[in-house]
Image (tube, grey):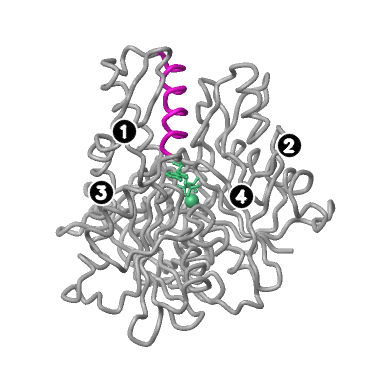
């Protein structure tokens, strides 16, 4: 049995392939109720972390603080596989944290899920896992490594909106025809916003471009509602303790999820003080967040009008739990009209798409994009100058099944030591410099002077110009998970060094 696992900022949802259907897995929570997700939360129990429903139970019964949205830690541009993070004030390895959560998910699948009888205890669970479309290399690596360490056999890793695109085709395929061939997937989750433009030909999906905001999601709407509640009660955030603020956010999340298009007022209790928020005021305050998503996806199709060349867009497909907020489709319909379709299961669309991706009999294929640039700062002119060199563009093709893009370049070395500082970035500016979320990928020092090949630490060797250096080949390849691997080789001696993300 193959699963699709959508590890989300707020919820983790699992779907599986069952003879052409893709049902969502249910889990029994601490109270014995059946739930269609596991909460992506953690809490300290002594020196250990517990996760999901046990963590919620612990928090509810003992007041232990609940750690939410830890997936956001992976999205930090400076994250590395060896990072230690603060979990409620105590240090913990980031990889250990995610591995712990994935292990909890594995155990929950085997013991409290409705598919437990189909999972044997000894075999690894086969799964297709997701990452946000613009996740950088370290985030992809950490996610993959955590699931593997937890004992999953990860069949492939697919970008979240690309998976939702599969679910769209499966469910709304009739909106696609020879004239309307593209779909814009709009994924507003708990912590991330992603938009991907996908060209669909039958079951073949080609992602034409992806854009997003790594830190914009339902969590931000909770904060806006909390601020509205404080304003209505004549209070300020600075007057609340951390625990009171967290409790207020929890209440606001529940209230927000309960909003219907007919709701007029929201009653909130701030530690005994009553706040009464007009939904209209909340909508006014939150519209800016929705407009941020519209701005972020504009480069994909502009205003989605025929003049933008968007006549062939069959629909904007709203997925992600936060698109369940009535304000979201309302703002989007004002802009884009009737082409806005809401998924009937906004929160489960990605997981269902992942299950489709993992179902070989479904016959779906995907070509995706790197979604972020990859380049290098090199030391030039005897170490006096650093120049930037873009290597792979955000449009580079990534295929989870077949061959992905890449690049090879060959030149004669002009220095004794090559100093390569690789980065990932959103885009390059007019001067060719990288801008947007700039994420360090790793550093590679290479001995062009063969006499230095035995030196372990090249960092102290002064960089000087040399004549008649070796023929050097740089190879950049993209693996099926969208992670770049860089190899520098001295073709004269056959010596090479590879930079790949590694866990400690
Ligand atoms: N009916 C609803 N109305 C409004 N918001 C909702 C509703 N249901 C869920 N949400 C919000 O959706 C968000 C969670 O969405 P989802 O489950 O898609 O995110 P996620 O997958 O956990 O996060 P991400 O994809 O960003 O990592 C939360 O902010 C939650 O409060
Ligand atoms: Mg999600």
Q: Left or right? Give the position of 127 relative to 212.
A: right
Residue drawn at x 59%, y 19% is 64
Whether residue 251 is in magenta: the answer is yes
Residue 47, compared with residue 365, is above or below; it is above
Q: Where is residue 176 in the image (x, y as percent from the top left)?
A: 41, 79
Residue drawn at x 28%, y 32% is 278
Residue drawn at x 36%, y 48% is 326
Disc 3 crowd rating (10 Å Cα; few below 14, some 14-19, many 20+) is some
Q: Position of residue 15 (x, y in %)?
A: 63, 58
Observer-side mark, 3 or 4, equals: 3
Q: Earlier in the sequence, mark 3 or mark 2?
A: 2
Quadrant containing the C terminus in the rendered view: top right
Q: Give the residues in magenta.
A: 241-256
Residue annotated with mark 1: 224
Disc 1 crowd rating (10 Å Cα; few below 14, some 14-19, many 20+) is some
Residue annotated with mark 2: 32
Residue annotated with mark 3: 292
Q: Which of marks 3 and 1 is nearer the N terminus?
A: 1
Task: Indicate the quadrant where residue 125 lies.
Answer: bottom right
Observer-side mark, 1 or 4, equals: 1
Q: Earlier in the sequence, mark 1 or mark 4?
A: 4
Q: Where is residue 404 in the image (x, y as percent from the top left)?
A: 47, 73
* Ligand 1 within 8 Å of the CB at mark 1: no
- As drawn, the residue found furthest toward the bottom would be 178
Is the C-beta separation of discs 3 and 4 under 8 Å?
no
Q: Identify the mark at residue 145; answer none if there is no mark.
A: 4
């Amino acid at each position: 049995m193959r699963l699709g696992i959508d590890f989300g900022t707020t919820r983790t949802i699992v779907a599986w392939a069952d003879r052409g259907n893709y049902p969502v897995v249910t889990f029994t929570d601490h109270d014995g109720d059946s739930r269609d997700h596991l909460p992506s939360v953690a809490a300290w129990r002594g020196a250990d972390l517990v996760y999901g429903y046990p963590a919620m139970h612990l928090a509810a019964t003992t007041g232990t603080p609940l750690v939410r949205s830890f997936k956001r830690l992976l999205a930090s541009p400076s994250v590395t596989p060896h990072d230690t993070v603060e979990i409620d004030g105590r240090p913990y390895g980031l990889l250990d944290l995610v591995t712990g959560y994935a292990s909890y998910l594995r155990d929950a699948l085997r013991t409290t899920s409705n598919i437990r009888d189909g999972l044997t205890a000894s075999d690894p669970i086969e799964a297709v896992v997701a990452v946000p479309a613009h996740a950088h290399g370290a985030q992809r690596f950490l996610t993959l490594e955590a699931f593997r360490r937890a004992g999953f056999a990860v069949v492939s890793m697919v970008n979240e909106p690309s998976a939702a695109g599969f679910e769209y085709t499966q469910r709304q395929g009739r909106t696609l025809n020879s004239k309307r061939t593209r779909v814009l997937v709009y994924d507003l989750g708990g912590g991330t916003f992603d938009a991907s433009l996908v060209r669909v030909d039958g079951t073949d999906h080609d992602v034409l471009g992806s854009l997003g905001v790594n830190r914009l999601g339902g969590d931000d709407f909770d904060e806006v509602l909390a601020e509205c509640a404080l304003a209505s009660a004549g209070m300020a955030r600075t007057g609340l303790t951390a625990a009171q603020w967290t409790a207020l956010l929890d209440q606001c999340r529940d209230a927000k999820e309960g909003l219907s298009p007919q709701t007029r007022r929201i009653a909130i209790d701030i530690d005994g003080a009553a706040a009464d928020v007009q939904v209209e005021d909340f909508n006014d305050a939150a519209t800016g967040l929705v407009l941020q998503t519209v701005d972020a996806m504009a480069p994909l199709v502009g205003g989605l009008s025929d003049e933008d060349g968007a006549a062939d867009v069959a629909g904007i497909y709203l997925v992600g739990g936060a698109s369940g907020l009535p304000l979201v489709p309302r703002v989007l319909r004002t802009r884009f009209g009737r082409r806005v379709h809401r998924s009937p299961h906004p929160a489960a669309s990605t997981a269902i798409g992942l299950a489709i991706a993992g179902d070989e009999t479904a016959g779906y294929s995907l070509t995706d994009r790197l979604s972020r640039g990859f380049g290098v700062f090199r030391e030039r002119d005897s170490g006096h100058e650093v120049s930037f060199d873009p290597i792979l563009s955000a449009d580079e093709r990534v295929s989870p099944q077949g061959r992905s893009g890449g690049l090879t370049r060959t030149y004669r070395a002009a220095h004794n030591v090559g100093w390569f500082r690789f980065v990932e970035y959103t885009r390059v500016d007019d001067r060719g410099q990288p801008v947007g979320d700039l994420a360090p990928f790793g550093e590679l020092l290479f001995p062009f002077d063969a006499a230095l090949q035995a030196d372990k630490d090249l960092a102290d060797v002064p960089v000087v110009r040399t004549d008649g250096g070796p023929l050097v080949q740089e190879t950049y390849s993209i693996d099926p998970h969208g992670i770049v691997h860089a190899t520098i080789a001295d073709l004269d001696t056959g010596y090479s060094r590879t930079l790949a993300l590694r866990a400690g």
